[in-house]
Amino acid sequence: MLRIATYNLESFGGTRLDADLLQPRIKALRPRLQDLEADILCLQEVNAQKPQGATVRDFSALEMLLKETCYADYHMAYSTREEAPVPGDRHNLVLLSRFPVSACRALYQEHMEAPFWQPGHADPPQEAPEPVRFERPLLQAQIDLGAKGTLHVFGVHLRAPIAAPIPGGKLSAQRWKSVPSWAEGYFLSAVKRAAQALDLRLAVDRVLDANPDAFVLAAGDFNATSDASALRLVRADCQETGNPDLEDRQLFQIDALLPQKERATILHGGRGRTFDHILVSQALKARFSKVEIFNSDLADELFDAGTDAENASFHAAVCAEFAL
């Protein structure tokens, strides 16, 4: 059996490595990672540190977290900055694999042209439409499963449904100047999230163009529930396309197999929502065995903010098992 999991570590690690400061988070997170027993682990929000005197960041904090776990010896792939093949400072995507990683790259609107947009309430006014680019890449990796073939994995972290900044639109970090400014920021955020989802969908189709029977998996924090447009776009259900002949291109949402009451990966004010997902191609769906969401002790991101619960993550991990 092959176990594949996704887990948002919620901004793990600082700008500089501080071992003492990390200990509470390591104590909280390490057992959760071990419980997953994953052969392939997709992580989100992994921060990179810059060692004293170095020019390139590394994952020293993550290495401390993985110490004394099975993941310490796994192969690693990670997202990189758009302008250089090095980790970013915050919120990197990381993939850990028991099996060799034969190829990997970060996708920044790789398969689509950036849309242009001009806000009407920027201060000072924006003189012309500008390209809308998203800050977070996708991570595309190929895993060598030996005689069982190649697994194409997409690490995902879509933009959160929170208004994006508009020049001059805020009075402070949390306070907007006007409703029109906030509305344009919220619209811009939705455009960026949809652009990420489209880039992912087109990247998946590129893989399936080459091999319709490919094992494809997309996992991560989609910041979207099952009925949200971003997730519907990535899945491309036959009910959406209206064409049964396109069924082999549909991605199957594994976590949706669980009863609704067991699916929560986030609690906010007592309300459970599922933002973290695992989607698979038809060929991989045929090998599916079981799925589990590790939410039995999930803290509430609103009610438990500012408590020791922040040492872990307000996200629950999702793990799926396949007969491979």
Image (tube, rainbow, N blue to C red):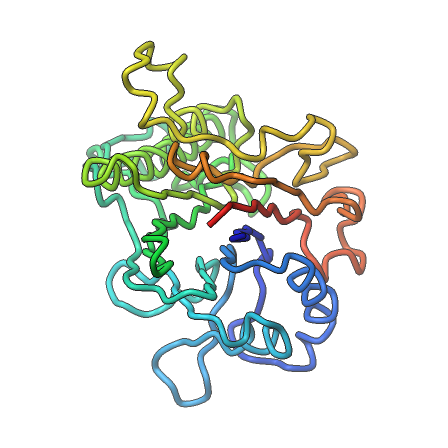
Give the quadrant of residue 194: top left
Q: Position of residue 1 (x, y in %)?
A: 54, 52
Instruction: Please determine whether, in this image, residue 49 is positioned above or below residue 34.
Output: below
Q: Residue at x 51, y 45 (%)?
A: 322
The outermost residue toward the top is 242
Q: Nearer the viewer, residue 192 or 110?
A: 110
Residue at 46% in and 88% down: 52
Q: Position of residue 66 (x, y in %)?
A: 59, 73
Please give the count of numbered marks on the rendered protein. 0
Q: Quadrant of residue 23?
A: bottom right
Residue drawn 22% across the image and 33% down it: 129
Pinpoint residue 31: horizontal percent, then vertical percent: 72, 65
Measured as percent of width and height from the top left, residue 48 is found at: 47, 70
Q: Up-down: is 44 above or below 182?
A: below
Q: Residue at x 45, y 35 (%)?
A: 285
Taking the view exactly as shown, the residue that stands out farthest to the bottom is: 53
Q: Would residue 289 be found to the left or right of residue 260 on screen?
A: left
